[in-house]
Image (cartoon, coloured by chain):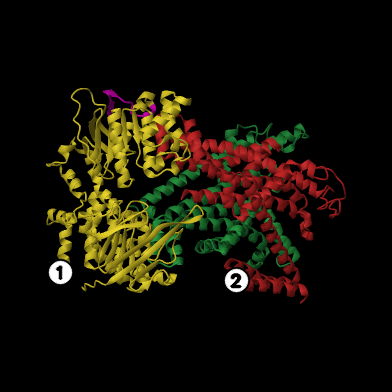
Amino acid sequence: MNYFIIGFYALVIGASTLAAYYQKRTAFILLFSLTLVSFVMGIVGGEAMLWGVTLLAGLIAFSAGVSYSFREFLIIILPRDASKEMRTAPLTAGFGLFVIFTYTIAGVFAPIIAPYGEAEVISSAFAPADENMLLGADQLGRDMFSRIIYGARNTVGLALLATILAFLMGATAGLYAATKGGKLDQLLGRIVDVIMSIPSLIFSLLLLSIFGTNTVTLIIVIAIIYAPRVFRLARSVGGNVVVMDYIEAAKLRGEGTWYLIRKEILPNSTAPLVAEFGLEFCFVFLLVAGLSFLGLGIQPPTADWGSMVRENATLISFGEMTPLIPAAAIALLTVAVNFVVDWMLYRSSGLKE
Amino acid sequence: MGDILSIIAKRLGLGLITLLVISIIIFFAVELLPGDIAQAVLGQGATEDNLAALRAELGLDRAAPVRYFEWLGNAVTGDFGNSLVSKTSVTEAISARFGNTLFLATYAAVIAVPVAILLGVLVALFRNSVFDRVANVVTLTSISSPEFFLGYILILFLAVKTGMFPAIAKIDDDMTLFDKLNRTFLPALTMVLVVVAHMMRMTRASIINLLSSPYVEMARLKGVPAWKVIVKHTLPNAWAPVINVVALNLAYLITGVVLVEVVAVTKRDFPVVQACCLIFAATFILLNLAADVGSILTNPRLRHPK
Amino acid sequence: MSQDKSVLLKIKNLRIEGYSDEKWIEIVHGVDLTLHRGEVMGLIGESGAGKSTIGLAAMGFTRDGCRISEGSSIEFDGMELTTTPASDLQSLRGARIAYVAQSAAASFNPAHKLIDQHTEAPVQYRIKKRLESQEDAMELYERLRLPNPREIGFRYPHQVSGGQLQRAMTAMAMACRPDLIIFDEPTTALDVTTQIEVLSAIRDIVDQFNTAAIYITHDLAVVAQMADVIKVLLKGDEVEEADTRTMLENPKDDYTKSLWAVRDFKRDQKPRPTEGLPLISVKNVDASYGDTPVLHDVSFDIFEGMTVAVVGESGSGKSTTARCITGLLPPTSGEVLFKGQPLPPDYRNRTKDQLRQAQMIYQMADTALNPKVKICDIIGRPAQFYSGLHGPELKSRVDELLDLIELDPSQYYNRYPPELSGGQKQRIGIARSLAADPTFIICDEVTSALDQLVAEGILRLLDKLQNELNLSYMFITHDLATVRSIADEVVVMQYGKVVEQGPKDEMFKPPHHEYTDLLLSSVPEMDPDWLTTLLEERGVDDIGEAARASKQED
């Protein structure tokens, strides 16, 4: 028993008691579960584990603080309608927006932010962090931090382009099929079923090994693989709108298919489609990272998070955190996007009632 | 009952046709290679002799449709030809891995499915409580993280730092079941974490979706206790989406694992890739079919026609 | 059977708040209510009056997003429900206070058999054993005159018809022999001929067990048959309360009087023009959905400037006939003529002018107007599409149309449909059809989703427009009151066939076709003795007779 452990338990127990005394139900449940978890962790893992718990709790508190201030910031600077929406956003969505914002800045201004070039070798392999290198060096002695910044531009940019392409193809075809119905609808539905029953990773592997691995083919292949998912959603969302009487009224007026899609169906399908865009982006992003991790994605020396995980993988058995950093960068972005999407889905479903 | 059987027969037929179309895509995609397979496999530096030898071995001198039917016929009997890299039977190579995968997937599924449904029911029961919100954040995080990230974290903390479980999941037939389970605990846990969140969220969502329906309000107004409202009045009507997501995740479990292994070794080993594609597509279709049948069987309107 | 008349339910100063737009808004403003044992109270009012909310509050229940305010008191048999813990409230529901919902089809769980849902509450409260309760269910089914009372309980909800389900639900409410049952619009979703069976079944069983009831409805004639006392509500406030006969004969409040007066609007019947071809002529039309035939040899004419009402219950094929005329469902045989010229069966083959001539107004204004399009664009689009108007011309046309439907252009020009009330939306729907400058408009149940006063306004507007613009209407409806007020000619349909047709005044005078007779006699009237008299008139083989006989044996 040292002062840290005593202090730690005194703090969590004291805080739980205070919460209970002032009848802060939510706070009490959170704090008391933390106390119970700490007991178990403390017994199993000893002091080190408790430090871990403290660190984690601190990290969560810190992100909550950042999310809160970022949300307040957005409420102030956004125009009135948008800021009213922001007020309803949970902290998780604020966190998501903050992360997305940071990544965008990092991606756009990569050459300015990164201290070294993308492929610049500046020290020995796997050199530890020092005052020049924030996160140490990779397997070739390039600056890890700079490569992560450039990775934001390459990996995210590529995933974004592929998602947009998939969306243009899938949403257009889906809404068209929903409006037209009949044979064409069934045919497109069948094609989509076929493509979707081939596992995406192996299908992209097959296509990439045939057409070669360069950025353009990568984007097209991924878009083809993910367009069917968008098609399905657009088809079902559009299908719900098409049965409305106002569509019948427009058809009986003699309006053409494109008018129906643009003016009548699309405005009523944006909410689920935008949310789907976020989700789809996550899947595409993970697939890009996965392909790169397997050496099929973005090719070296271009910095990319997926391949960075693989290249530094050996360090994991030495208990090093380094390979986890690009992996964490991937995870953080997908989590952030999902937080925002979750909020948007909640809102769009809430508005229906 | 006749209705159900005919629906199922229809789905089965559709599944078979889909599989056939996929086999055509898989086979003829390779034909689109610039040059031919031999050129693609051996690369620019290959001599004419080497190329000719490989072409002869693969029978490229015959027309593509002929080779397709030959390939398909062999595939149906379980023969996928030889690997271009190791020259050994593809079927043997895959089946060994496939066995391991099935073991791992079953292991993960046996833990994941009940846990996910139980947790889903619990969060639906205590919706909007702290428990529900924490669960929401945690599941969302674990769904959106790449699995290698989760895998690495688990390896780092449970194997390397604390040494509770072995990091390398090598198993062979001589091991006892317990040993196998212990050895494969980490990968299985990774998979469980990835799929539980997804299934649990779907269970919660489909239950919550039904909570505003008039028959649930009726049950409440009959004085049925809250847990019974969930278990007896919503769950039986919520199965279809849950079954679908379970099937999707099982397919993911089965295809996910081997893939990572196979892909890493065989970038240009087309027979292996084709075989994997076909087997996994078949698995996928089969599981979807099972999910369809499950949804039909749990739908009282279809089970008890007028 | 004891005839205890003590006070069962006493509600004092009931205030209920609903949560919307991030604040609590009061929706029920201090309502008092006293109900004695064995008494039936009718709660009546238009949508938004708070009837259902009050009904549910009598069970100590509020829907999600609602709460009972401080200071309200709900005393049931000496127990204060607003302070009773949730678990005790739960054991009160079903056992001592039961609920019968509007849509029985949606309120029975599709996954369980009727009888299992019936026995759930009695078994839960250990009032009866499972088998005992099943036996009791069958007996109740018999009393409620359900066919095959010993077997029907073992069916699933989707295997039973709507009227039967509604009776099974009443039986379920009776399962624990409660002191009080809340009926929330139990016959609103039913056809008139089915409604009678359910009404008489409910009335008898409530009588037999001396159960107190709160009967919620918007239909005055229905409540007149069912209630001992009527309470009129308006926007969460009580307007007045009196026993049924006093209330019907001598309403005090102006609002109540206006409700009573609604059925007065009646237009004189116009004769057919003596010369010229009919504007629309439906000739021997057969139609089917897939392999299921739905229309058989339907023929009728609509002359210029006239209103033809097509009447029938659900499934009679009246809306399908409209689909054949508009070309959404091409007939399998027969044809539709416009001024003597056959129209192409499929709307996609019709000319722009043919499409323009025939317009449609829908039942649900909510789904008939695109919620994401501004009013000016909704109305402006047909004018732009058919007449090529744009710029200031288009704007003045839209203003003119808004004036026609009596909405202020400056106020509504830039609004979106969700911001409008039901009646206003229906008016926009009318304006959109007028924008095409048509000669013929199909009105598909245009008033059935609206409150009576609002519906009345719409009918008057349609009548005014017909006179000003010389329009012809095809009026699809199941409501004979609407037919009485606006039609010139009537077409009665049943099972996809035209049963009878002719001028309105002839149709409402005997002799009728058998089905027309049934339909006409089934429409509830404001006379509290109407149901009793009708059931007696319908004779000895009538179902009500048997029940009364069995009651005398008790």
Chain ID for yellow: C
**Rendering colour (chain B):** green
Q: Is residue C85 above or below residue C66?
A: below
The answer for how far apart the CA atoms under marks 2 and 1 are is 65 Å
Secondary structure at numbered mark 2:
loop
Kindly identify the residue that appears in the image at 76 percent across and 77 percent down: A1
* Magenta stretch encompasses residue C346: yes
Q: Which residues are magenta?
A: C334-348
Nearest the viewer among C248 and B270 is: C248
Q: Amino acid at mark 2?
A: Tyr
- Residue located beneath label 2 in the image: A22
- Residue located beneath label 1 in the image: C553
Kindly identify the residue that appears in the image at 23 percent across and 30 percent down: C301
Q: Is residue C244 left or right of residue A68?
A: left
Chain ID for red: A
Q: Is residue A280 above or below residue C543?
A: above
Kindly identify the residue that appears in the image at 58 percent across and 52 percent down: A87
Residue C410 visible in the snapshot? yes
How many marks do you count on the picture?
2
Nearest the viewer among B236 and B265 is: B236
Residue C427 lies in quadrant? top left
Residue C68 lies in quadrant? bottom left
